[in-house]
Amino acid sequence: MSLSLSGISLTSNPVEEKHVKVLVLGSGPAGLTAALYAARAELEPVVLTGTELGGQAALTHTIENYPGFPDGVGGSELGELFQKQAERFGATVEFDTADSVDLSERPYKVTTDNGVYLADSLIIATGARSNHLEIPGEIKLTGKGVSYCATCDGWFFKEKRVVVVGGGDSAIEEALFLTRYGSSVTVIHRRESLRAGKVLQNRAFSNPKIKFIWNSVVTEVVGNEKVTTLKLKDTQTGLESDLEADGLFIFIGHTPNTQMFKGQLEMDELGYIQANQYMETSKPGVFVAGEVADSHFRQVITSAGMGAAAAIQATQFLEKETVLS
């Protein structure tokens, strides 16, 4: 279509639609493993990286429980290895983000920042994002002392007083990492015991830089240009107190990145996409893998396994269509 404005001809080019057999949304362990398996099946998968190449795992300084790496491996390094292996067999990794998805008919339509994809099958591996405390001062001071990634920001807190909120594996792993930089690391947990694995607990309890404040929550982050004080409340007595701090790292769980699929796929009450044991969702040809469907295990290896399963099922789904057509 052409428009004329003051003698100047303006031509609007239609958005290019790319047709693919398998489109993978997400570039974490689940998405890249799915791409590897789909590529080995010669389905020429395309991976849309989203905003975080490598997913949440890439933000972890050292992953010690992924088989094959007895000395551990950096999260970003492992992500790069996943990517190289998938690309070796023919996967294409696009640094692009899906803006909307239309699952009303096949091929499924995915609109991105750079174009439109029509996919015969879709593997959703969009992962989950860090939860916020939703307290006064948190948003205002994010990037000024409030953080959700110790690997990203720990370096800025050399010889500073650091506080970690949470009691799971991620919180304790990041607390241990922060001892490399901070003069002290205080873990605040709303309960009187940790949920983290015993190995991590033992390391934390034996680390002289780490101390614990139990049965407490942070109710406010105080500071102007940087964090100076945290307001605490005892969950049992209701007693309020102040804690001087230079940094606050929050690790209290995640919310699945499923906003685009609401009303189109079946989800549980927390927003995780529901699937059967074959990674099949409520739409034919749409499969899911990783933390976007897993609120329980949330491990790199389980996400990778789900990615492999999703790709195998997508391959079988497309093969059946070819036979029947």
Image (spheres, grey):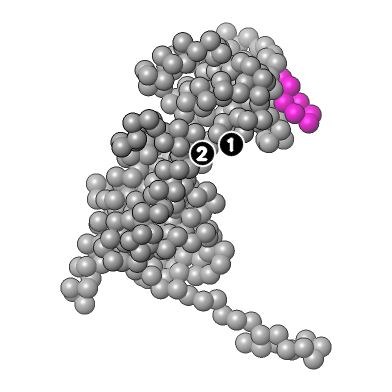
Front-lying residue, 177 or 266: 177
Q: Is residue 276 above or below residue 301?
A: below
* Quadrant housing residue 219: top right
Q: Is residue 225 above or below residue 307?
A: above
Label 1 is placed on what type of residue? Answer: Cys
Residue shown at 41% from the left, 73% from the top:
19
* Quadrant housing residue 194: top left
Camera sees residue 55? yes
Residue 96, horizontal then vertical, whole percent: 53, 60
* Residue extending furthest toward the bottom: 7
Determine whether the residue tagged by mark 2 lies in a helix, strand or loop: helix
Specify start and end residues of the magenta stretch as a single range.
Answer: 223-230
Mark 1 touches mark 2? (CB < 8 Å):
yes
Local packing at callout 1 (Cα closer than 10 Å; few below 14, some 14-19, many 20+) is few
Task: Kindly report the distance in space between the C-alpha atoms of the residues bearing marks 1 and 2.
Answer: 7 Å
Label 2 is placed on what type of residue? Answer: Leu
How many labels sit on residues? 2
Mark 2 = which residue?
Answer: 59
For residue 233, the mark is none
Left or right: where 242 falls relative to 41: right
Camera sees residue 217? no
Screen quadrant of the N terminus: bottom right
**In the rendered structure, does residue 73 fall within the stretch colored magenta?**
no
Left or right: where 223 falls relative to 208: right
* Residue extending furthest toward the left: 323
Mark 1 = which residue?
Answer: 152
Residue shown at 41% from the left, 53% from the top:
83
Local packing at callout 2 (Cα closer than 10 Å; few below 14, some 14-19, many 20+) is some
Determine whether the residue tagged by mark 1 lies in a helix, strand or loop: helix
